[in-house]
């Protein structure tokens, strides 16, 4: 049974148009060079699949998780349209394929040290306690030397009103991300304003925060 929040996402996604477009997120595209070729990637809250399907097209083995069954169905359709092989279990993943899983990330049993990369693009649906728990699970899911890519909206984003949550406690700044991911080797951390054109859901001048980090080899 979907939570009321996930039911709201189902309702929002229930249209033919892809709310966040079908092209990959710009930060993901410019940062993908950090990812190990052919590696196993967890795409957290991957929505309608623009990022997960693109990653599979780049030759990664993509495990895409999202809590909205409507979004997952649209991602499956996008994979089919792009000729990307969709597999039916995580064990069947090979480079260039995608496995879709519909799951609430609050309840999901997150794998441990299973991924060469974990990608989170605009995953600001949680309140602080659940966010801390989710960030911890994202770190836990990385293999040693694995890379985490995260982009979200900055605390100033409500001034623009061009997408994302309006609740300040769901937004980021660099201090919040520096503290949350201090266990990772930091490769990039920056906050900046930029024009975003990613579907009707994210369009216009936006305040963004990006983080890239690598799991230490202990
Ligand atoms: C702003 S959208 C971003 C989707 C995708 N990452 C992208 O950039 O196109 C946020 C996504 O979070 C998903 N979501 C919200 N709450 C969730 C939860 N508790 N568990 C899993 N996914 C969730 C929604 O279904 C939606 O697809």
Image (tube, rainbow, N blue to C red):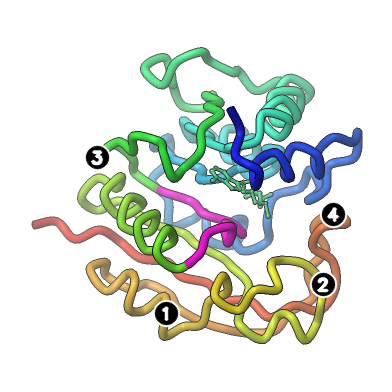
Q: Which residue is mark 1?
A: 176
Residue 154 drawn at (x, y percent): 61, 79
Mark seen at residue 112: 3
Image quadrant where one finds the C terminus: bottom left
Please tell me whether mark 1 sits on a helix, a strand or a loop: helix
Residue 38 drawn at (x, y percent): 43, 35
Q: CA distance from mark 2 to mark 1?
A: 22 Å
For marks 2 and 1, the one nearer the N-term is: 2
Q: Which residue is mark 2?
A: 162
For marks 4 and 2, the one nearer the N-term is: 2
For marks 1 and 4, the one nearer the N-term is: 1
For marks 3 and 2, the one nearer the N-term is: 3
Tell me, yes or no, whether the two marked residues, 1 and 4, touch with CB atoms within 8 Å. Answer: no
Q: Place residue 100 in its image quadrant.
A: top right
Residue drawn at point x = 56 percent, y = 70 percent: 170
Q: Which mark is in front, 1 or 4?
A: 1
Q: Is mark 4 within 8 Å of ligand 1?
A: yes
Residue 211 among those drawn in magenta = no
Task: Read off the magenta span.
Answer: 118-127
Q: In the rendered view, would you say 156 is above or below 197?
A: below
Between 47 and 189, the one nearer to me in the picture: 47
Question: What secondary structure characterizes most of the magenta part?
Answer: loop
Q: Place residue 135 in its image quadrant.
A: bottom left
Q: Which residue is mark 4?
A: 199
Residue drawn at point x = 81 percent, y = 76 percent: 161
């Amino acid at each position: 049974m979907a939570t009321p929040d996930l039911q709201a996402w189902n309702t929002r996604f229930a249209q033919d148009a892809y709310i966040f477009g079908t092209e990959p997120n710009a930060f993901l595209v410019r940062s993908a060079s950090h990812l190990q070729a052919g590696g196993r990637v967890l795409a957290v809250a991957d929505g309608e699949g623009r990022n997960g399907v693109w990653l599979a097209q780049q030759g990664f083995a993509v495990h895409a998780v999202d809590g909205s069954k409507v979004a997952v169905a649209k991602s499956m359709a996008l994979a089919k349209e792009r000729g990307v092989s969709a597999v039916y279990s995580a064990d069947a993943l090979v480079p260039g394929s995608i496995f879709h899983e519909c799951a609430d990330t609050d309840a999901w049993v997150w794998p441990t040290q299973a991924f060469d990369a974990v990608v989170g693009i605009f995953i600001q649906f949680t309140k602080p306690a659940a966010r801390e728990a989710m960030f911890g699970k994202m770190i836990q899911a990385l293999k040693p030397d694995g890379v985490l890519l995260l982009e979200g909206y900055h605390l100033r984003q409500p001034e623009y009103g061009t997408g994302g949550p309006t609740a300040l406690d769901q937004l980021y700044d660099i201090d919040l991300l520096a503290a949350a991911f201090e266990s990772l080797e930091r490769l990039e951390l920056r906050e900046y304003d930029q024009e975003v054109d990613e579907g009707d859901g994210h369009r216009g001048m936006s305040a963004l925060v990006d983080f890239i980090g690598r799991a230490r080899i202990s």
